[in-house]
Image: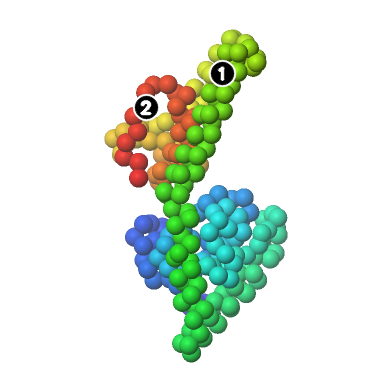
């Protein structure tokens, strides 16, 4: 394998930009249940790259195996992943290699897959994510209004006042723990929960907008009139 693989430590946004522009194929295969929705494959697809990814998390939402990319798995456990994934990935790489070199002989499958990958990428953009959250929040608000209306008519039992107060106090305390005033940002930021994103624990990465959106309903419990700005 010597001379065929290069390990690049300390990846940053500049390196990711180079990878997006220079790599024809992106392999994004986290172990089962270890990543909800990675962005490396999405970045590649939005620039016309072809992905090999596991059938878990975000990739199956927009990658159609053999058309807009390649999918491997699913895998039931980490043991299953290590036993099967290497061969599965190699098989997909062999297929893509044949497509790439055959494309010089007039075979259009390589360019067709690159185009389909690009056309599928808007399914997992920030705009698509925000619309999903808006739909969820709208449903939650309507359910809450229905419960409040039922309580006003005596059809829904209200929780005991002391039990409710204790629950709200615990929720507020938990929500407050995810807010962090970062001197580097000169303002408040939201901790995603992962130690890699928690500057208080020595994390070097900053939270993404999607994490803020996930946490927003719970953070509203904090009840201190939070003002959101600078979210990208």
Q: Is residue 193 visible?
A: no
Of 153 and 223, nearer the camera is 153
Image location (x, y in percent) of residue 36: 55, 49
Residue ID for mark 2:
226
Q: Secondary structure at mark 2?
A: loop
Image location (x, y in percent) of residue 79: 70, 58
Marked residue nearer the N-terminal end (1 or 2): 1
Residue appearing at x 41%, y 43% in the figure: 209
Query: Cα distance, mark 1 to mark 2?
Result: 28 Å
The image quarter containing residue 86 is: bottom right
Residue appearing at x 55%, y 56% in the figure: 61
The image quarter containing residue 20 is: bottom left
Instruction: Check the picture and name the quadrant holding the N terminus.
Output: bottom right
Residue ID for mark 1:
149
Q: Which of the two discs, 1 and 2, sits closer to the camera? A: 1
Q: Residues within 10 Å of mark 1 (few under 14, many from 20)?
A: few
Residue appearing at x 42%, y 62% in the figure: 46
From the viewer's perspective, tell me whether residue 132 is left or right of residue 225: right
Residue appearing at x 41%, y 58% in the figure: 11
Q: Is residue 84 visible?
A: yes
Image location (x, y in percent) of residue 97: 53, 80
Decide: is 131 above or below 65: above
Name the residue furthest front.
153
Q: Secondary structure at mark 1?
A: helix
């Amino acid at each position: 394998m010597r001379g065929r693989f290069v390990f690049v430590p300390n990846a940053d946004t500049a390196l990711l930009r180079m990878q997006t522009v220079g790599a024809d194929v992106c392999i994004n295969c986290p172990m089962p249940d270890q990543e909800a929705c990675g962005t490396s494959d999405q970045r590649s697809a939005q620039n016309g790259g072809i992905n090999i990814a596991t059938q878990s998390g975000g990739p199956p939402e927009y990658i159609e195996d053999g058309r807009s990319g390649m999918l491997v798995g699913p895998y039931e456990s980490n043991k299953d992943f290590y036993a099967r994934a290497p061969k599965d990935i190699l098989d997909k790489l062999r297929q893509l290699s044949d497509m790439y070199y055959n494309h010089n002989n007039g075979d259009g499958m390589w360019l067709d897959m690159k185009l389909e990958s690009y056309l599928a990428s808007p399914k997992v953009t920030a705009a698509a994510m925000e619309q999903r959250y808006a739909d969820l929040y709208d449903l939650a608000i309507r359910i809450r209004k229905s419960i409040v209306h039922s309580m006003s008519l005596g059809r829904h039992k209200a929780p005991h006042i002391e039990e409710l107060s204790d629950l709200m106090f615990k929720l507020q305390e938990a929500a407050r723990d995810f807010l962090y005033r970062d001197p580097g940002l000169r303002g408040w930021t939201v901790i995603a929960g992962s130690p890699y994103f928690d500057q208080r624990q020595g994390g070097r990465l900053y939270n993404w907008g999607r994490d803020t959106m996930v946490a927003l309903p719970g953070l509203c419990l904090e009840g201190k009139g939070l003002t959101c700005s600078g979210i990208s």
